[in-house]
Image (cartoon, rainbow, N blue to C red):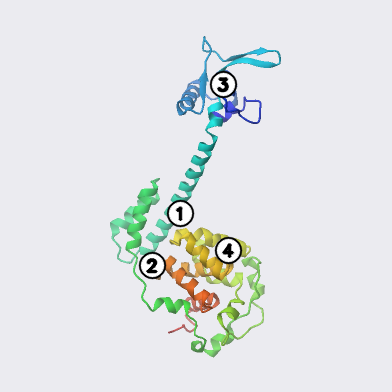
Amino acid sequence: MLKALLSFWPERELPGAPGGAIVFPSNRALSERLSGMPESTLRRHLAALTASGIVRRHDSANGKRFARRAGAEIGVAFGFDLSPLARAASALAQAVTEATLRRERIAVLRARLGMLRQRLLGTGAPEELLEAARLLLRRKCSEQVLTAIVSRLEAELPAETPAEIPALTVSSPAQLSASNSQNERHIQESDRSYSDSESTQQAEAVRLDTAGPAEKDAQLSLPMVAETCREYRAFFPDAPKGWHELVAISQRLAPMMGVEPPVLHEAQRIMGPERAAATLLCLLERHAHIRKPGAYLRRLTQMARQDSFSVFSMLATLSRRADPGNCQLTI
C-alpha cells in the first residue's frame, strides 16, 4: 500500500515539511495500482498506515481527496500526507538494519542448533532436550529462545581430551613413515575450481619430511582443502570456484561453530585469509571432538604467530584419518 501511495508522488524526493507531500488518489485508482485489491482490504491497509504515523490524513470538509490549482502549481490538496515518512526515514533505516541483523542472528542460531543436535545424537544427551531442539527447528521462535536452547546443547557437548588437540595440530615429520611421505603430492597453489582437481593431482611429488610450517603451507591448494574437508558441504554444497569463495564460506560458518568475529579476524590477520579458512574447515571436520572451536582456533593462531603451526600438516592428518590404509600421526 505504501509503495502504491508513493507512486502517485511525481517528484523523486519527499519533502519533510508538514503538508508538503500530499497525494490524492481515489480508492479506484489505488485498487488499480494494487492489482485490483478489494476496497475493504484497501481501507484496512490505509488505516494501518495512518495508525503507524508514517502517513497522515489531510481530509477535506466532505472527506473527498482532490486538489485545487493556482496556475501551474497546486494551491491546496486533500488526501494522504507522506511527509511523516520523509521525517522518519533515518529511524526507519535503522529499524530495517536492526531487523536484518536480528534475522541473520536467528539464521545463525538455527544453523548452530541443527549442528549441535546432530553432534549430540547417540552421545547420551537427554532425549527431551534433543526432541525440543528438533521441534524448534520446525517452528518460528525468538532469538532469546534459540539462544537458551543452544546454550543448553553446548553444555551437553563432551569435552575433548588433552591428547586430541596435538593429535590434530602438531606435526612431527619423524613419525611419518617413509612410504607415506613419498606418496604425498605437490599441488601448485591455484585459484581454480575444485572441478579441476583431477588434473592438479598429477603434479610433481615432493618430500616434506624436513620442511618447516611455512614451507609446508606453501604447498596448500584449494583442491586439497576441498577434497579433504567435506563437512562444510552440508551447508554449502556447491564447490568453491576460488579461494575468495572458500574464505567467504568460512566467514559464514564461523558464527555457526561458535567462533567469535574477533577470534576469526585475528586468525585471518596472523595466518592470512586462505590459511585461516582452511584451518576453520579442518576444525569443522573434527567438530564432534572439539567443544570450544573458538578457543581452539585462538590457540592455533598463537602457534601460527610463533611459526609452529602448519595447516598443510593438519590437512594431511585429516586425510590419513579418513583413509584406514594410511598410517596415523601419533604423539
Tag 3: amino acid: Gly
Asked whether disc 3 touches disc 1, contact meaning CB atoms under 8 Å apart, the reply is no
Disc 3 crowd rating (10 Å Cα; few below 14, some 14-19, many 20+) is some
Whichever of labels 1 and 2 marks the residue nearer the N terminus, that label is 1
Residue at (46, 23) in percent of width and height: 47
Measure the C-alpha gap from mark 2 to mark 3.
60 Å
Q: Quadrant of the N terminus?
A: top right
Q: Residue under label 4, please give it.
A: 246
Image quarter of residue 185:
bottom right
Secondary structure of residue under mark 2 = loop
Give the side of residue 162 with respect to residue 74, left or right: left
Q: Residue under label 3, please give it.
A: 19
Measure the C-alpha gap from mark 4 to mark 3.
53 Å
Whichever of labels 4 and 1 marks the residue nearer the N terminus, that label is 1
Q: Residue under label 1, please give it.
A: 108
Image quarter of residue 4:
top right
